[in-house]
Amino acid sequence: QVQLVESGGGVVQAGGSLRLSCAAAGLSFSRYAMAWFRQAPGKEREFVAGVGRTGIGTHYADSVKGRFAISRDNAKNTVFLQMNSLKPEDTAVYYCAAALWGVGVPDTQYAYWGQGTQVTVSS
């Protein structure tokens, strides 16, 4: 059974930082591209960042470029999202997801999802 478990969310003031983690189990982690999505109240889920199977290729939404950094540790089956210079509009539930065919923006590309972790940025 595949499990993706996010952690590291919380409440932070604007301008602060958080580091999210997503631990994977039950899949050949290094075969999957990994991504982070987020969903704010009343809005659709959106792509935030993605990383290829080896960790070399990354892709970011324009709204987070220069502030967020995605990385992965294949030895620990874990993907990370370092979030700096956080803004109130970053407030959302953040989800990690796994895709066998590479990083992409559409969420339909991803076969497995975590339960999400709440990030709240206060102004």
Image (spheres, grey):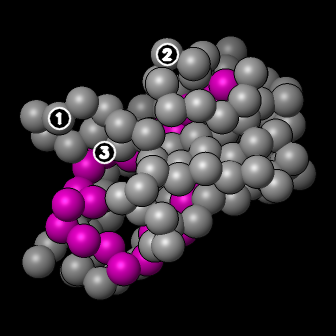
Whole-Å distance between the Cαs marked 1 and 3? 11 Å
> Is residue 81 shown in magenta?
yes
Q: Is residue 118 above or below residue 82?
A: above
* x and y percentages locating residue 40 in the rendered image: 21, 43
* x and y percentages locating residue 83 in the rendered image: 46, 69
In front of the other: 102 or 92: 102
In front of the other: 17 or 54: 54
In front of the other: 84 or 3: 84
Are the two marked residues, 1 and 3, in contact with CB atoms closer than 8 angstroms?
A: no
Residue position marked by numbered label 3 in the rendering? 93
Residue position marked by numbered label 2 in the rendering? 108
Residue position marked by numbered label 1 in the rendering? 43
Main SS, magenta residues: strand
Is residue 60 visible in the rendered structure shown here? Answer: yes
Are the two marked residues, 2 and 3, in contact with CB atoms closer than 8 angstroms?
A: no
Q: Earlier in the sequence, mark 1 or mark 3?
A: 1
Q: Which residues are magenta?
A: 79-99
Of helix, strand and loop, which one carries label 2? helix
> Is residue 90 shown in magenta?
yes
Quadrant in the rendering for residue 37: top left
Q: Is residue 31 above or below residue 65?
A: above
Which residue is painted at 86% across and 47% down in the image? 54
Please state which amino acid type lies under the numbered disc 3.
Answer: Val
- Point out the image quarter for the C terminus: bottom left
